Image: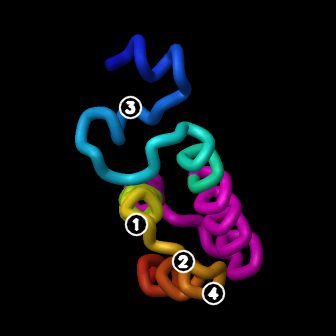
């Protein structure tokens, strides 16, 4: 599987589970969206998420994106607001 991943740019998670996007580019885009949303939330609210909370939030949001769920910036911000409390 790793050979296919490297040779063709196919996402390793998709190869292993069949879930999410098949291309690495989509995963990178999701990572950028989530990272940016977390940073924007922290900057605008003046709140720093604890490392373990940030990791859990990131993982949850990434799983949602991987399943094809399209979340708006506002939905992500609302989720972060709930997670921060």
Q: Which residue is depicted at the point 50% across and 17% down?
A: 6
Residue 27: image location, x then y, percent: 54, 46
Which dot, 4 or 1, sits closer to the camera?
1
Q: Earlier in the sequence, mark 2 or mark 3?
A: 3
Q: Which residues are magenta?
A: 31-55
Which dot, 3 or 1, sits closer to the camera?
3
Position of residue 14 in the picture relative to residue 8 (left or right): left
Secondary structure of residue under mark 3? helix
Q: Earlier in the sequence, mark 1 or mark 2?
A: 1
On screen, residue 29 above or below 14: below
| Mark 2 Cα-neighbour bin, 10 Å: few <14, some 14–19, many ≥20 | some
Secondary structure of residue under mark 1? helix
On screen, residue 77 above or below 27: below
Secondary structure of residue under mark 4? helix
The reply to whether the C-beta atoms of the residues labelled 2 and 3 are less than 8 Å apart is no
Badge 3 is on which residue?
Answer: 12
Which circle marks residue 71 in the picture?
A: 2
Which dot, 4 or 3, sits closer to the camera?
3
> How far apart, in angstroms, are the residues tagged by discs 4 and 2?
8 Å
Which circle marks residue 64 in the picture?
A: 1
* Residue 71 forms part of the magenta stretch: no
Q: Which residue is depicted at the point 58% across and 55% down?
A: 30
């Amino acid at each position: 599987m790793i050979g296919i991943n490297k040779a063709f740019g196919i996402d390793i998670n998709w190869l292993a589970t069949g879930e999410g996007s098949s291309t690495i580019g989509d995963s990178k885009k999701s990572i950028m969206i989530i990272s940016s949303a977390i940073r924007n939330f922290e900057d605008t609210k003046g709140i720093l998420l604890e490392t373990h909370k940030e990791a859990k939030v990131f993982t949850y949001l990434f799983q949602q994106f991987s399943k094809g769920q399209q979340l708006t910036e506002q939905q992500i911000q609302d989720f972060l607001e709930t997670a921060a409390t």
